[in-house]
């Protein structure tokens, strides 16, 4: 399963809206202080989807640098609290889905990522039942398929 299953349907034309979604995604990858290969690949897929085109390594690096600079003197949770409420209502569920998928894509959600997702849920003002349904959807989609091996006697 790739991150594409959790992405907005198409490119986001408004750069501010797109960048807010991308920064939220970045923040969950930065929350635990390490960037897993799966997270980096998924972030690139997200950036390409949101931009509507292939992106270069330099473009990804420039965006990472910009978002890292925004963190200067703040925590990832502080930034989520600052930017998530500004996200357009029509992108909030997509953002929650994407952030949760990024946290789980490396099969190693950290306590820092869990805390960030909790803050994101509150900052996006999602209904609890809807957030739980979205979380279940993401967890099921990212779960490894059940083993098809049949035990032998």
Image: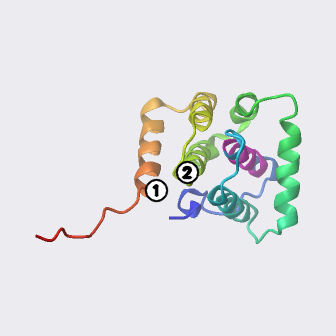
Give the colour scheme shown.
rainbow
Residue tagged 1: 142
Q: Who is closer to the viewer here, 25 or 9? A: 25
Residue at x-position 43% and y-position 57%: 141
Could you say where residue 146 lies in the image, as x and y percent from the top left?
31, 62
Residue 114: quarter of image: top right
Labels 1 & 2 near each other (Cβ < 8 A): yes
Distance between mark 1 and mark 2 Cα atoms: 8 Å
Residue at 63%, 46% in the rendered image: 91
The crowd level at tag 1 (other Cα within 10 Å; few <14, some 14-19, many 20+) is some
Q: Main secondary structure of the magenta part?
A: helix
Looking at the picture, tell me which residue is in the foreground, 70 or 110: 110
- Tag count: 2
The magenta stretch spans residue 24 = yes
Q: x and y percent of residue 65 in the render?
A: 87, 49
Residue at 53% across / 61% down in the picture?
A: 5
| Magenta residue span | 18-28
**Residue 153: horizontal and vertical position, in percent?**
10, 70
Q: Which mark is residue 28?
A: none
User: Of marks 1 and 2, which one's residue comes earlier in the chain?
Assistant: 2
- Packing grade of label 2 (10 A; few <14, some 14-19, many >=20) is many
Counting from the top left corner in percent of width and height, residue 97 is at: 55, 48
* Badge 1 element: helix
**Residue 32 lies in quadrant:** top right
Q: Is residue 108 above or below residue 116?
A: below
The correct choice, above or below, for 56 with respect to 28 in the image is below
Q: Which residue is label 2 attached to?
A: 101
Q: On the picture, is 64 further left or further right than 152?
A: right
Asked if residue 23 lies in the magenta stretch, the reply is: yes
């Amino acid at each position: 399963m790739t991150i594409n299953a959790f992405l907005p349907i198409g490119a986001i034309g408004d750069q501010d809206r797109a960048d807010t979604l991308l920064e939220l995604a970045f923040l969950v990858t930065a929350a635990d202080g390490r960037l897993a290969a799966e997270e980096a690949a998924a972030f690139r897929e997200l950036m390409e989807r949101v931009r509507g085109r292939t992106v270069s390594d330099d473009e990804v690096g420039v965006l990472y640098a910009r978002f890292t600079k925004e963190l200067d003197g703040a925590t990832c949770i502080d930034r989520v609290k600052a930017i998530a409420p500004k996200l357009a209502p029509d992108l909030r569920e997509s953002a929650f889905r994407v952030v949760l998928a990024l946290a789980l894509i490396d099969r190693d959600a950290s306590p820092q990522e869990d805390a960030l997702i909790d803050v994101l849920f509150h900052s996006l003002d999602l209904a609890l039942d809807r957030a739980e349904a979205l979380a279940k959807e993401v967890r099921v989609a990212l779960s490894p398929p059940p083993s098809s091996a049949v035990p032998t006697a």
